[in-house]
Amino acid sequence: MPSTRRLALLLGGLAMFGPFSIDTIFPAFPQMAAQLGADKLAMQQTISVYLAAYALMSIVHGPLSDAIGRRRVIVSGLAVFTVASIGCALSRDLPTLLAFRALQGLSAGVGLIVGRAVIRDVLQGSDAQRLMSHVSMIFGIAPAIAPIIGGWMLGVGRWPLIFWFLAAFSVLLLVSTALWLPETHPPQARMPLRPERLLRDYVAIALNPRFQRLAAAGAFGFAGLFLYIASAPAFVMDLLGLGERDFAWLFLPTIGGMTLGAFVSGRVAGRWRPPYQVGVGYACIGGAALCNVLYNAFAPAIAVPWAVLPMSLASFGVALVFPILTLAILDMYPRQRGSASSLQAFTQLVLNSLVAGALSPLLSRHGLHLALGMAGFTLLGWLFWRWESNVARRFPPPPSVPTLEPGEQL
């Protein structure tokens, strides 16, 4: 087994190539639209198509890793992602680009989804929370540096260079995984991959009220922040009036807050009770959403740095909340962590796809509309968390849920 530091670096890198696929192309939207003959709404579909495919395949990655092992699924996914990135780089029309973006989405989830199961395979309790927080710190760098890298590449070449970079990055991860990642899910612990069993398990997990509350609390809590990430081209270039190399104004404060929050989460693991940590996290997200609404409502014109500072506090809160909710879900299904991780990711990704494909084009024309959207998602996430907290006080959940057998339901 590699050291915790090396494992954190590797799992963090595996989680990064999903966000890289979204954020590196943001600065290239105007150039891509001009070459491909597409408008802003059509270019937004390069994000929503990717996320829809990511969400669809996310329900397969986890169970597949439960059945054939974590390492094999990760290596296969990286190989497919490399081919898809090369296809994007060689695309000369929008339909071809969208097809390969969908293929990227189908393979990109292996790093994040299966990586979560790897963490819980090797560590427990506060140790698992620390490792997940370390991975989150590394993962959090991706959205900050991705658009900056994209902007630099546009300075030396055209937009296909971004996809060649993604292909090279995935090859690097593939080699690193082959060399350093051991198999953490041994054959004796694996579950047979049978469609009828998988369907029954998914239905049982999805209908579990506690899973629904935890997954919704995490998904809505992050959706407000993701609304700004998905709207980055319009927010940065249209609303703030900045250039294609100025995406750092949005992403650096956002990821700085997320990285700091992940660091704090690792430091307080075993010291703060998990419900208290989630409460602090939501207080930060809620405070950020309120400040954001007030600024956009009363400022004569939004501008940096004030327009982006609330994102820093919101991302700090998200980083406190997410490890606790994720580990709580994984601990509910000790022999089906892959399936539980997949279904949690699917919930998040379906919501993200709706945000990117439907809400972002509608709300990103006005700063106040974006701020109100963020506030609404924050309120929904907090309400689901309060619901879970009230139920947990009355009916404390067991330490884990036994493995589901064929035909069983929770």
Image (cartoon, rainbow, N blue to C red):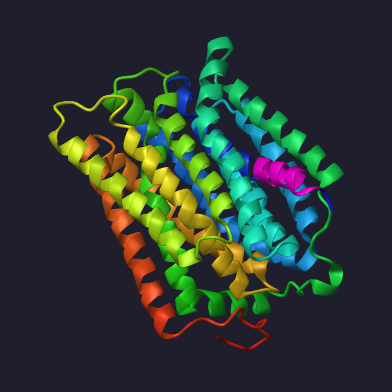
Q: Is residue 335 left or right of residue 395?
A: right
**Residue 349 visible from this viewpoint:** no
| Residue 191 image point, x, y percent | 76, 74
Q: Which residues are magenta?
A: 3-14
Above or below 97: residue 197: below
To which quarter of the image does residue 201 belong? bottom right
Q: Is residue 393 left or right of residue 8?
A: left
User: The C terminus is located in which quarter?
Assistant: bottom right
Above or below 291: residue 120: below
| Residue 289 image point, x, y percent | 28, 46
Q: Residue at x 66, y 68 (%)?
A: 337
| Residue 333 image point, x, y percent | 63, 74
Q: Is residue 303 left or right of residue 260?
A: left
Q: Residue at x 48, y 35 (%)?
A: 256
Q: How many marks?
A: 0
Along the line of sight, which residue is nearer the eye, 31 or 398? 398
Q: Residue at x 40, y 73 (%)?
A: 388
Query: Can residue 189 be found in the magenta stretch?
Result: no
Kindly report the secondary structure that dominates the magenta region of the rendered protein: helix
Query: Can residue 13 be found in the magenta stretch?
Result: yes
**Residue 200 visible from this viewpoint:** yes
Q: Residue furthest front?
A: 271
Above or below 363: residue 286: below
